[in-house]
Image (cartoon, rainbow, N blue to C red):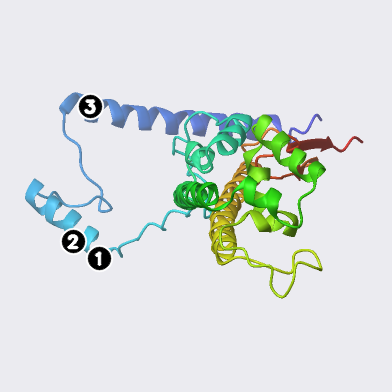
Amino acid sequence: MFGIPHIRPVLGSQVLIARSVQHAVFVGVLLTALATGVCHASRLEFPPYTPGEILLAQRAIADSMPMVTPPPPIASPIGAPADDEDTGPAKSTGKAFFMDLLIPGTGHLYVGNKRGWVHLGLEGVTWVTYFYYHDRGTAKENEFEAFADANWDSVAYKNGGTYREDRWQILRDFIANDNMQQYYEDIGKLPDYWPGWNGYTPYPDPVPQGSGDAATRIDYYGMRNDSNNFLKNARYAVIGGFVNRIVSAVDVLRIMKNTGQSKLGRDTKVKFNAHTKPFSPDNALKITITRKLY
């Protein structure tokens, strides 16, 4: 009953007595051994060894075990910082953008991108080119203006066969309004004013108008074209510098977005529209930032 095997009373008593005798004998032997201090080792125990022999055995075991080479550390992906690498404080996307608009390349260097040296070098080349051609164009401009003042005479123009009062009034208005650029352009470009040049010859005849010319006017016109070409190259350099600014600013936005440092997000796009004309008050730059909404 309740899982206990059924034992007859007589046999149960004999079993209990036998177990009690065995326990008493074991306890008695154990107490005797403890009292006398004498213990007998069994045949399964190891014989005693000196410390030197134990040390030699440990070395032999260590030499017999194969060397385990630890696995190499897992390299971080290219461009990704290591776990223990201090990436420093987060860089401002807006600051990098406007730094590149002001001085191309400085925004790249601010965020730690070496491409900024390229844009910065292009900016230096831009200004060197601009000053070189602008100075040559200005010097040539002063030269042809002085040449015109010495070789074009209003009295000779009035005595020529192409004189008209309204045309002469236009020149006087240019002088009164300090619009000398237009004045020097017209006296060398329009045939109506050619008789005022020193050495003018109405060949083959004064009719039709402007059939004659002067060697001084031809030389003057060549000097003026050289000046215009130099100044045009200077303006091209300015345009190149402006393009470098736009490209640099857009590139640093792309870099910041790809490295995860930009706060714009993947759903944000930046679009630029530029209306450029050097030295014109109508120049404009439009920046449009759009974000996709879900």
Identify which residue is drawn at 73% across, 56% down. 190
Q: Residue at x 64, y 32 (%)?
A: 178
Percent across and percent down for residue 169 are 76, 38
Marks 3 and 2, Cα distance to the nearest angstrom? 38 Å
> Which amino acid is tagged 1?
Ser
Using the rendered image of the protein, determine whether residue 76 is visible from the camera's viewpoint.
Answer: no
x and y percent of residue 284 in the render? 75, 37
Percent from the top left, x then y, of residue 127? 48, 46
Q: Nearer the viewer, mark 3 or mark 1?
A: 1
The structure residue drawn at horizontal position 48% and vertical position 52%, both measured from the top left corner, is 140
Q: Quadrant of the N terminus?
A: top right
Task: Name the residue furthest bottom.
Answer: 204
- Distance between the alpha carbons at the discs numbered 3 and 1: 42 Å
What is the secondary structure assignment of the residue under circle 3?
A: helix
The residue type indicated by label 3 comes to Leu
Three-letter code for the amino acid on which mark 2 is drawn: Ala
Residue where numbered disc 1 is placed = 64
Residue at mark 3: 34
* Cβ–Cβ under 8 Å for marks 1 and 2: yes
Which quadrant holds residue 12? top right
- Of 161 and 294, which appears nearest the observer? 161
Q: Earlier in the sequence, mark 3 or mark 1?
A: 3
- Specify the quadrant that holds the C terminus: top right
